[in-house]
Image (spheres, rainbow, N blue to C red):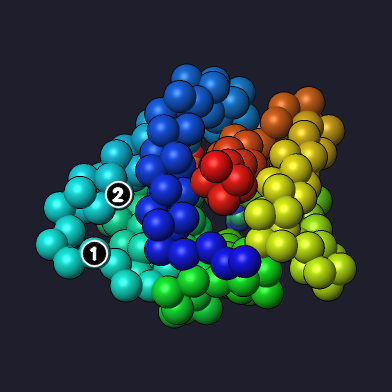
């Protein structure tokens, strides 16, 4: 089985819904170790994405078309660190999903490309208390599942679970990238907001695939 353009559009709509529902939580997480705008930044971005999606005259032909719309909109509306990072992630993901539907290998390629985009842009590695700590285990879990012959729904399910665990794993870490790094040792004991939003976006992908 495969995931088609309808899945991609449903994923994006669920991203907007989940980001809106968790806006306060993301703000609060970012208030603790950043400047408190992550929930607002993400909500503004995905609200703009939905407006663009609703205004489309021709429906998107490929999964990549949908992800490219997300990328360009996030880049121009989110700002801060997360805008260019998520923008690059979705842009790289769009480049490897230039097809009407994707299989398990395609899901792995999407997540790996997103991670590569974030690393290219932000130069963080795992353990620096950033969204890389959620994307990396997600990519690894997805690749492992796909190699075992798991279908795309199952691949996204394990990826979302790994991202959630990756986000939790940031709590004890001391931030060495991004705004939270200004706090030094005082950043420990808090969950990184970008890794939390990553877990929410991948959970939305999984739910869109399952339903
Ligand atoms: P800002 O810090 O500019 O206010 P946001 O609050 O929207 O931007 O996003 C902060 C999140 O961005 C952090 O929680 C972290 O996950 C992510 N981030 C910051 N810098 C980097 C980086 N260099 N690499 C990867 N992710 C990063
Ligand atoms: Mg912030
Ligand atoms: Mg900011």
- Is 200 placed above or below 136 here? above
- 186 to the left or right of 15: right
Q: Nearer the viewer, mark 2 or mark 1?
A: 1
Residue 59: mark:
1
Residue 182 percent across, percent down from the top left: 63, 39
> Which residue is drawn at the image coordinates 46% and 49% (left, top)?
11
10 Å crowding of disc 2: few (<14), some (14-19), many (20+): many
Residue 49: mark:
2
Query: Of the residues under marks 2 and 1, which one precedes in the sequence?
Result: 2
- The quadrant holding residue 75 is bottom left
> Which residue is drawn at the image coordinates 13% and 62% (left, top)?
57
Q: Quadrant of the N terminus?
A: bottom right
Residue 8 percent across, percent down from the top left: 44, 57
> Which residue is drawn at the image coordinates 59% and 26% (left, top)?
29
Distance (Cα) linking label 2 and label 1: 14 Å
- The quadrant holding residue 154 is bottom right
Residue 122: mark:
none
Q: Quadrant of the C terminus?
A: top right
User: Please, what secondary structure does the residue beneath circle 2 have?
Assistant: helix
């Amino acid at each position: 089985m495969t995931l088609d353009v309808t899945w991609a559009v449903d994923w994006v709509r669920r991203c907007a819904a989940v980001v809106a529902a968790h806006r306060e939580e993301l703000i609060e997480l970012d208030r603790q170790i950043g400047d408190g705008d992550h929930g607002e930044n993400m909500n503004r971005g995905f609200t703009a994405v939905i407006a663009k999606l609703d205004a489309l005259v021709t429906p998107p032909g490929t999964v990549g078309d949908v992800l490219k719309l997300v990328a360009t909109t996030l880049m121009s509306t989110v700002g801060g660190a997360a805008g260019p990072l998520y923008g690059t992630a979705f842009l790289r993901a769009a480049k490897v999903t230039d097809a009407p539907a994707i299989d398990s290998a395609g899901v792995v390629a999407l997540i790996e490309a997103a991670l590569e985009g974030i690393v290219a842009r932000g130069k963080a590695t795992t353990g620096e208390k950033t969204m890389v700590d959620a994307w990396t285990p997600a990519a690894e879990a997805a690749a492992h599942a796909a190699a075992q012959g798991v279908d795309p729904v199952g691949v996204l399910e394990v990826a979302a679970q790994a991202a959630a665990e990756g986000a939790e794993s940031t709590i004890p870490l001391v931030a060495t990238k991004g705004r939270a790094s200004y706090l030094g040792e005082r950043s420990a004991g808090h969950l990184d907001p970008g890794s939390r939003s990553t877990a929410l976006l991948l959970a939305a992908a999984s739910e869109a695939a399952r339903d």
